[in-house]
Amino acid sequence: MKNVFETLIELEKQIKTLNEFELISLENAKGRFLYEDLRAKKDLPSFDNAALDGYAFNYEDKNEPLSIKGTIFAGDKKTYKLEKNECYKIMTGAKIPKNADTILMLEDENLQNGKLIISKEIKQNNAYRYKGEELKKGELILKKGELLTSAKIALLASQGLYKIKVFRKVKIGIFSSGNELKEAWESCDDDNIYNVNALALNALFSSPSCEVSYLGIIKDDLASTKEAFEEQNFDILLCSGGASVGEADFMEEALNSLEFKAVFKGLKARPARPTKLYEKNSKFVLVLPGNPMAAYLACFIFGLKILRLLCANLDNEPKIFAKMGKTLKLKSGRNNFVLGRLKNGFFYPTNDNKFGSGMIKPLIQSEFLLISDENQNELKEGEELSFILL
């Protein structure tokens, strides 16, 4: 049994990316994973232009009255040229005239007898945007596997890359397991419990890159368990419950009989210890603990990691660095999941990290997750650590 960090490294080595893509337009690209490297089709900017409204002039003439030859508007394709002691009024984005190298902002204009006087200190090349200063034609702009955000879509639009290849949607099926479970829309007496995990995991994978299906509750017997996993055409099957070693946990026996191979069986971690991953023909079954806290955190760490790896995304969860607001004692020999919030730049564990794996409220009360190293027996006040945004 390995710890969380060792297991994540192993997954990066073992999980191969999908080899199928969709061709989509930029309107539908947010939240999808890019299928191939993309390069700039043109320089950005594609010509020298003004960064603001003002006057374009030659810096050598800054101490002389400048005759205003006219106005250059954005979109004007005509080539303009300055002679000695001349300037052009120019609008943001407009083409810089020849012999000009500096822009005086419009708010600083000083006109005397119809001429422009440069009366304010100004640096040469002020507000001058050079051709290709942001991107050169042929330059790599986005890599295969990148998650497309609004800003990245803006960059693609600047290059006229309107139709792009993205990884096809990852097909995810969700089961829950247990005779005691009732669906949220059903009547539930005190002898049963509501099926929390299915809806929570569905929400966790709710993104444009996923196609999620809820497949129901598996009853606690071998035949039902085996039947549930036969002939399933999903990239990832998630099942909460049946991950431990109780007499009614038939997951391992069912998956072995269907010739699934274990990628890992258990973790040196609290509260995700019973988590298991199986694989057959590049199809994965992630067996999660039945307790809501453990199931959610295990899937947050490993389920989303598998999704990213299938789509060639090697980025880890967004992390921040902050200092511990108080000392917290831990049990060493395992990774401990520590939930908490930031206050005045310091991290404070929720309820001093005293929670059971069946609880839900600590997830709501927390903004960040810390995964301790296996050999840590305390987190010291003032110690700077990295935290994952939940």
Image (cartoon, rainbow, N blue to C red):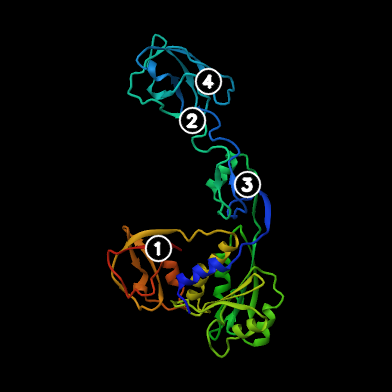
Among numbered discs 2 and 1, the one appearing first in the sequence: 2
Among numbered discs 4 and 2, the one appearing first in the sequence: 4
Q: CA distance from mark 4 to mark 1?
A: 51 Å
Q: Which residue is mark 4?
A: 72
Q: Amino acid at mark 3?
A: Leu
Vertically, is 228 above or below 214? below
Q: Which residue is mark 2?
A: 130
Q: Amino acid at mark 2?
A: Tyr
- Mark 2 lies on a secondary structure that is loop
Q: Looking at the rendered structure, which numbered label has been put on residue 387?
A: 1
Residue 239 percent location from the top left of the image: 59, 76
Residue 57 is left or right of residue 161, and the answer is left
Q: Can you tell which of label 4 and label 2 is closer to the viewer?
A: 2
Q: Can you tell which of label 2 and label 1 is closer to the viewer?
A: 2
Among numbered discs 1 and 3, the one appearing first in the sequence: 3
Q: Please rate how many residues cluster around mark 1, counting C-alpha atoms within 10 Å: few if below 14, some from 14 to 19, many from 20.
A: many
Q: Amino acid at mark 4?
A: Ile
Q: CA distance from mark 3 to mark 4?
A: 32 Å
